[in-house]
Amino acid sequence: MKIQKVIKCKVVCLTNVKRELLTQEYENLQRFLCGDNSVKLYSANKQQAERFYKRVKPDKEYPLSIRKDLIKVERRDTKIAKYWARIPVAGRRVEFGLLLSPIKIYQMSRFVNLSSLGEAVISTCI
């Protein structure tokens, strides 16, 4: 039996470059789930999508599901936000493809996880 933490948050105060990279990663995930294997997508996000989304509805949008070993949420008391997340995206080679983004957490919950997936799911609203 494992305890899982789910963080639902909103990415806030993005620069134009960060907004473009995050939007591109999200749109490429949607295209990948619809069957386009040629899109540029972070490799771990691609593996996660193949494992997590077995059946996909064509007219539905799916959130980025990021493995717990790839995401890091930090508390930094800055004027922009209290919490920051490092989100893996394709096309970003500085710091191993991680995008440091300010986030606003609106729900953080812990619950007992009976499965062995061990994943942290971040639902983002851009």
Image (cartoon, rainbow, N blue to C red):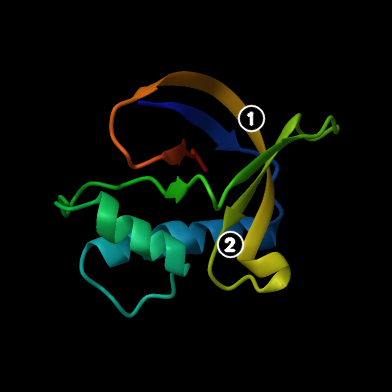
Find out whether the residues at labels 1 and 2 contact each other: C-beta distance under 8 Å: no
Percent of width and height locating residue 52: 27, 50
Specify which label sits upstream in the sequence, 1 or 2: 2
Q: Which residue shows up at 44% across the image and 63% down it?
A: 44
Does residue 82 appear to the left or right of 61 in the view shown? right
Percent of width and height locating residue 15: 71, 54
- Give the CA separation, mark 1 to mark 2: 19 Å
Which amino acid does the dot numbered 2 rest on?
Glu
Q: Which residue shows up at 58% across the image and 62% down it?
A: 20
Asked which quadrant contains residue 93, the reply is bottom right
Does residue 105 appear to the left or right of 119 in the view shown? right
Which secondary structure lies at badge 1? Answer: strand
Q: Which residue shows up at 48% across the image and 19% down it?
A: 109
Identify which residue, 60 or 99, lies in the foreground.
99
Q: Which mark is residue 104?
A: 1
Identify which residue, 116 or 80, lies in the foreground.
116
Percent of width and height locating residue 47: 35, 63
Does residue 65 appear to the left or right of 101 in the view shown? left
Categorize mark 2 by other alpha carbons within 10 Å: few (<14), some (14-19), many (20+). Answer: few
Q: Which mark is residue 20?
A: 2
Categorize mark 1 by other alpha carbons within 10 Å: few (<14), some (14-19), many (20+). Answer: some
Residue ranking furthest to the front: 1
Tally of numbered discs: 2
Which secondary structure lies at badge 2? Answer: helix
Which amino acid does the dot numbered 1 rest on?
Lys
The image shows residue 66, relative to residue 2, as above or below, that is below
- Quarter of the rendering occupied by the N terminus: top left
Residue ranking furthest to the bottom: 38
Pair 1/2: label in front: 1
